[in-house]
Image: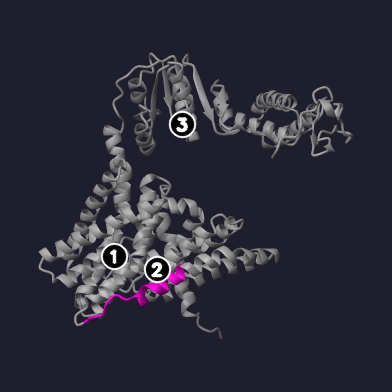
Amino acid sequence: MSAAAPPYLVQSGVFLAAAVVAVPLFKRLGFGAVLGYLIAGVFLGPSGFALVHDPERVLDFAEFGVVLLLFLIGLELEPARAWAMRRPIFGLGGLQVLGTTALALGGAMLLGVEWREALIIGMGVAMSSTALGLASLEERGLMSTPGGNASFAVLLFQDLAVIPVLLIAALVAPGHHAKLSASAVLPALAAIVAIVAIGRTLLRPVMRAVAKTGLRELFVALALLIVIGVSLAMQKVGLSMALGTFLAGVLLADSEYRHELQLDIEPFKGLLLGLFFMAVGMTVDLRLVAANPGTVFGLALLIVAAKFALLYGLARATGQAPRDAGLFAVALSQVGEFAFVIYGLGEAQKNFSARTADTLNAVVAVTMLVTPLLFVATDRFLRRRLAPGKNEAIDERKPVIVAGFGRFGQVLVRVLTARGIETTVIDRDPDQIELMREFGWRCYYGDATRLDVLRQAGIDEARLFVLAIDEPAQSIKVAKLLRERWPALPIVARARSRTEAYAFRELGIVSIRETFHSSLEAAAESLMHLGMPRHTAQQVVREFERYDRKMLEHSFAVRHDRKALMSLAEQGRRDLEELLSNEKLLREVGTLDGVTDVSVRGRDGVARNDTPRGDAEPPRAA
C-alpha cells in the first residue's frame, strides 16, 4: 500500500504543469512569458480553481527569485561601472520616488482620503516591481538600452528607500510617537560595510578552495549559500534582500569565478521568478474584483496612466530620447510587490481597514497584470507609427537598394556613403529603424518580400540590390522574387551559413558569407601570435580561402546527399593538411617561445622548419 504523495510535491507538480502550459501559449500569442505566469497564477489561486490555498506563503518563498535576479545583474556590473551609475540611481531614482509619492498623496487627498492613509498609499504607489520590470526588459533584450539602464537605476534606488519608507509608515501610525534614531540606521550601514569587507577578503579564497575540490555540486551549494547568507543578513537589519545580493554580485563581478556563479544560479533564478509571478497572480481576489470592477480597474488604470506620464516626463527632462523614455515609463508604471508589505503594515497599524487593504492589494495586482500588456501595446504602437499601412511611403530613387540595416548592412552602407554613392535602406525591424534614425541615418520600414515596397523603393531604376536581411528564409524569398521579376539586376547577398550560400548559388547569386573573412583574419592573427611570420600566416589563409571556395563549388553538386557531403568534408581535411604542410609554402616558420615547428608537419609526421632563426619574425605577445 503506497503512502499519499507529500503536499509540497503535489503543489510543485501543479506549478510546473501550469508554467509548461501557460507560458508557451502566451509567448506564441505575443504576450510574453511574464503575463503567462501571472495568468496561470490567477487560475491556480484561491479565487480561481483553488489548487493553491496559501499564496502568501508561496510569495514569501518565491521572492527569492527576485533576490537571485539582482545577484546576477550585480555580477554583470563591475564596481567602477556601478559607481558610475550613482547619479541616475540617486538623482532620477530620488525624483521618481518623491514625485510619485507626492502625486499619489495629492490625488488621494482630493478624493477625501485622510492624510496619513494617503501618505501610505502614495509610498506604496511609488514602488515599482523590480521582478516584473527587469524580467520584461531582459525577455526583450532591452536591459542594455538607455531606457533599460535608467529603469534599473530607479529600481535600485527604490530598494534603498525601503528603510525610510517603513520608518515613515510607522511614524504616521495613530498614537505612535516614535522618533527617528541612529539605532534604526546603524545596523543597516554596518551590514553593508560587513558585506563589502567579506566580499573583498574572504569570499574569493573560499571559492578557490571549493573549486579545487572539483565537485560541481559543492560549488553550486556555495553559490546558493552566498546568496542566502547575504539575504538573511540584510533582512535581519531591515534592508531589502535584493539590494544586499546585488551588492554581493557587484563585489564578485571581477572575480575569476563569475561565469561559474552565473551558470549555477541562472536555472534557480528562472524557476523562482516564474513561481514569483504565479504567486502574484494568485493574490488577485477575483471575487473582490467582480464585486467592485469599476473601483479596482479604474484606480489601477488611473495609477498606471499617472505614473507613466510622470516617468516619461522625468526621462525626457533628463535627456532621454522618446523611445527610451517610453520604455522607461512602461517598465516602471506598475505598483510593485513591496506595496503589499506597506499596505499590510498600514492595516496592522490601523491606518486603514482590512477592506481598504484588500482593495489596494487588488489594485496593485491589476497594475502588475497591465504591464506585460503595455509592453505589447508599445511594440505594436511603434510598428504602426513607423509603418502606416504596414509600410512607409518611400519618396526617393537611389542607385542602390539595401534590404536589412543590421550589423552587415550598416558597414556596407557606410562604405558606399563615404564614396558618395546614395542608397535607399529598408528594414522591417522598427526598433532598429528608430535607433538608426536617432543616429542620423535615413531608413524606411518595409517588407522587401512585397512587390509594392520594392517598386516604391525604385527597383526598376536601381543598379544594384544588396540583400543584408537577418532572417535566412526571408532573404531567400527576396532573392527568388528578384530573380523572377528583375533577372538582370545585380545582387550582392549576405549568407549566414553554407546552407544559405547553396540556396543563393542555386539562384545564380554569388553570396558573401558574413563571418568567413573575419574568421580568416582571426586565424591569421592566431598564427602570428603563435610565432609564424606575418607573410607566411597571410599566405596560409589565402591558400585556405582559395581551397574553401573550390570546395564550396564541389559540395554544391552533392548538397542534397549527406553521405557524399561527409565524404567530401573528410577528403577536404586531408587535402588541406597536405596543402598547408607544403615545404615551399611554409619555408619560413617562426618559433613559439623557443619551441621549433608550430604544428607545421607533413603527413609523414616529420617537422619542417627550413628558415634560419634570424630570418623569422619574433613571436607576437599573446
Location of residue 487 with respect to 192 vertically, above or below: above
Residue holding disc 1 = 365
Q: Secondary structure at mark 1?
A: helix
Which residue corresponds to the image point at 32% horizontal and 76% vertical from the top-left?
A: 181
> What is the count of numbered marks?
3
Kindly identify the amino acid type of the residue bearing the numbered disc 2. Ser
Could you say which quadrant of the image residue 452 lies in?
A: top left
The answer to whether residue 480 shows anywhere in this view is: no
The residue segment tinted magenta is 176-192
Direction from residue 180 to residue 492 in the image, left or right: right
> In the drawing, what numbered circle is on residue 469?
3
Kindly identify the amino acid type of the residue bearing the numbered disc 1. Ala
Q: Position of residue 278 (x, y in %)?
A: 38, 66
Q: Position of residue 580 (x, y in %)?
A: 78, 28
Direction from residue 504 to residue 430 in the image, left or right: left
Q: Is residue 178 magenta?
A: yes
Location of residue 542 with respect to 387 vertically, above or below: above
Kindly identify the amino acid type of the residue bearing the numbered disc 3. Ile
Q: Is the stretch drawn in magenta largely helix, strand or loop?
A: helix
> In the drawing, what numbered circle is on residue 240?
2
Which residue corresponds to the image point at 55% horizontal and 58% vertical from the top-left?
A: 262
